[in-house]
């Protein structure tokens, strides 16, 4: 009983007090960040990307509008992007050095910080669903390779033929990388990882990320996307984050957890310093934006690039990226709805609307 009272007291302290007009739900999505050149983007290509982002945004928004959970919303948003050959996740994943497609994904529920992740999966059409199965139906958080596939089989996931994931453009990228001895970034130009973060009407947040990794990856290389705390993190007390970018740098900074930890600290300090009990500890959009920009600056300082999407319990849906563009979208119950591709020269941050 004592424990329960203590837990309730803690929850009261740590749950941010919300403004009256705060959005009831929020969603942000990404389809990768990178060196995007407007001159290379034909009107047809642009329309195709925007349509794919709109479809994903609508799939997730519908769940949230109808009172569904943040977890269901992020899965609904990520699945169409995994199924689209435009993005580097599921169908359309980049090739490994050995000419295979190896998929990584992770998912996290901010309610209880339950998490699931898979790496190096070759025959599962929607890795985000397998990551979620690890979360809900195993005692583990992270499964890899053959073991993850055995788990998928046992849980009734159909075996998708590896050819399903292969696309000519990604194969050409691998061939060029090998022939010209290039780096992944020279042939990919953008990180096509997909991700979604959401806040639902019950105040719960969730995050998910899915990727094929980087072209020419070898030796079992795994990036940040399936690593809880690097590419994905969700905690009701702070935020939900999904990242895209040069995975090695995001791993070293622990980007997603770093952002949530800083936001949680702001909540805690505000609560502790509040002059009156109802003064509230809500984080303002500009404060959250400052934190994601700072963490991305840290990534840039080490030499990495990419971007993040964020939602907070207050309903802020924000982006930060240090590349020339990021495929992205956001929607809230307050009527915000937008997709975007390009940004400014080096860093772009959204204008927070709420
Ligand atoms: N972050 C991913 C990785 O390093 C790549 C991406 O964002 O597209 O595997």
Image (spheres, helix red, strand yellow):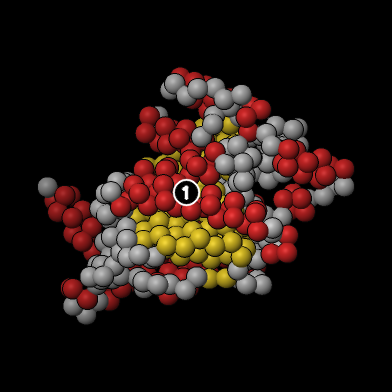
Numbered circles on residues, count: 1
Vertically, is 293 above or below 73?
Answer: below
Q: Is residue 329 left or right of residue 327?
A: left
Q: Is residue 269 left or right of residue 245?
A: left
Residue 331 seen in render: yes
| Closer to us: 219 or 325 | 325
**Residue drawn at (38%, 47%) of the image:** 73
Rendered image quadrant of residue 215: top right
Residue 340 location in percent, x, y?
54, 62
Question: Which residue, as the protein is rendered here, is positioned at the far bottom?
Answer: 275
The residue under label 1 is 56
Rendered image quadrant of residue 14: bottom left
Residue 257 seen in render: no
**Residue drawn at (48%, 44%) of the image:** 78
Vertically, is 99 above or below 308?
Answer: above
Vertically, is 85 above or below 143?
Answer: below
Q: Which image quarter holds the C terminus?
A: bottom left
Residue 224 location in percent, x, y?
58, 48
**Residue drawn at (47%, 48%) of the image:** 56
Badge 1, how many Cα within 10 Å: few under 14, some, many 20+?
A: many
Q: Is residue 13 left or right of residue 172?
A: left
Residue 6 location in percent, x, y?
18, 55
**Residue drawn at (26%, 70%) of the image:** 21
Q: Is residue 237 left or right of residue 325?
A: left
Residue 181 location in percent, x, y?
86, 47
Question: Which residue, as the protein is rendered here, is positioned at the far right?
Answer: 180
| Closer to us: 50 or 109 | 50
Classify mark 1: helix, strand or loop: helix
Mark 1 Cβ and ligand 1 under 8 Å apart: no
Question: Which residue, as the protein is rendered here, is positioned at the far front?
Answer: 44
């Amino acid at each position: 009983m004592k424990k329960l009272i203590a837990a309730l007291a803690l929850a009261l302290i740590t749950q941010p007090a919300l403004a009256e007009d705060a959005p009831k739900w929020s969603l942000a999505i990404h389809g990768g960040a990178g060196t995007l050149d407007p001159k290379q983007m034909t009107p047809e290509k642009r329309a195709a990307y925007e349509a794919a982002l709109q479809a994903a945004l609508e799939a997730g928004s519908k769940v949230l509008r109808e009172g569904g959970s943040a977890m269901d919303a992020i899965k609904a948003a990520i699945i169409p992007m995994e199924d689209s050959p435009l993005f580097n996740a599921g169908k359309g994943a980049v090739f490994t050095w050995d000419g295979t497609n190896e998929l990584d994904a992770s998912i996290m529920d901010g309610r209880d910080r339950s998490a699931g992740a898979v790496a190096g999966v070759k025959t599962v059409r929607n890795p985000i669903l397998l990551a979620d199965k690890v979360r809900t139906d195993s005692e583990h958080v992270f499964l890899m390779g053959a073991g993850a596939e055995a788990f998928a089989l046992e849980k009734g996931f159909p075996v998708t033929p590896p050819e399903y994931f292969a696309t000519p453009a990604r194969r050409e990228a691998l061939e060029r990388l090998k022939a010209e001895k290039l780096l992944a970034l020279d042939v990919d130009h953008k990180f096509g990882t997909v991700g979604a973060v959401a806040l639902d009407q019950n105040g719960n947040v969730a995050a998910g990320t899915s990727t094929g990794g980087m072209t020419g990856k070898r030796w079992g290389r795994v990036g940040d996307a399936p690593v809880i705390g690097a590419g994905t993190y969700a905690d009701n007390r702070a935020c939900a984050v999904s990242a895209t970018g040069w995975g090695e740098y995001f791993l070293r900074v622990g980007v997603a957890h770093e952002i949530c930890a800083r936001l949680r600290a702001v909540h805690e300090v505000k609560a502790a310093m509040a002059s009156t009990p109802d003064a509230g500890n809500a984080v303002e959009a500009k404060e959250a934006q400052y934190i994601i920009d700072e963490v991305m600056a840290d990534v840039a300082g080490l030499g990495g690039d990419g971007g993040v999407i964020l939602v907070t319990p207050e309903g802020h849906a924000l982006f930060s990226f240090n590349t020339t563009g990021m495929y992205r979208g956001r929607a809230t119950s307050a009527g915000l709805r937008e997709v975007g591709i390009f940004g400014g020269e080096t860093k772009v941050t959204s204008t927070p609307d709420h």
